[in-house]
Image (cartoon, rainbow, N blue to C red):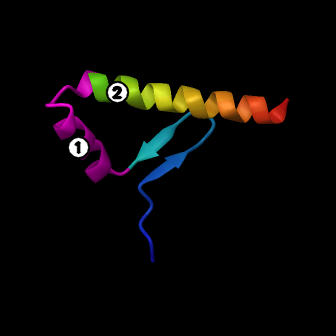
Amino acid sequence: MAKQRMIVTDDQVLIDTDLLFNAIREADGDWQKVEEEMSNYLDSVQHMVKSGQD
């Protein structure tokens, strides 16, 4: 069975801790950058959903 890495709801991104900590490591420990990237990702998904409902 495949492991879910990320679940996106209307107002949340639920992310696997391995994926999250790997992203922080890749950003050389800059968790604020990763937080901003995740927030931007959620904004993008929300925009796509809103565009699809129009």
Amino acid beneath label 1: Phe
Query: Residue type at mark 2?
Result: Glu
Q: Quadrant of residue 34?
A: top left
Q: Relative to residue 42, is residue 37 drawn left or right?
A: left
State left or right for residue 9 relative to residue 18.
right
The spot of residue 21 in percent (x, y) is: 23, 43
Q: Position of residue 53 (x, y in %)?
A: 82, 34
Which residue ends up furthest to the bottom in the rendered image?
1
Q: Is residue 46 above or below residue 4?
A: above
Residue bearing mark 2: 35
Q: Check residue 23 for magenta coloring.
A: yes
- Residue at left 45%, top 45%? 14
Magenta segment boundaries in residue numbering: 16-32
**x and y, in percent, of residue 41 in the image:** 49, 32
Which residue does the image show at 51% across and 49% down from the upper left?
A: 7
State the separation of the CA atoms marked 2 and 1. Answer: 11 Å
Q: Residue at x 45, y 26 (%)?
A: 39
The secondary element bearing badge 2 is classed as helix
Query: At numbered mark 1, what does the secondary structure look like: helix, strand or loop?
Result: helix
Query: Which quadrant, please, contains the N terminus?
Result: bottom left
Which residue is the extreme one toward the right? Answer: 54
The structure residue drawn at horizontal position 41% and vertical position 31%, both measured from the top left corner, is 38
**Mark 1 Cα within 10 Å, few/some/many (few <14, many 20+)?**
some
Q: Give the main secondary structure, helix, strand or loop, of the magenta stretch.
A: helix
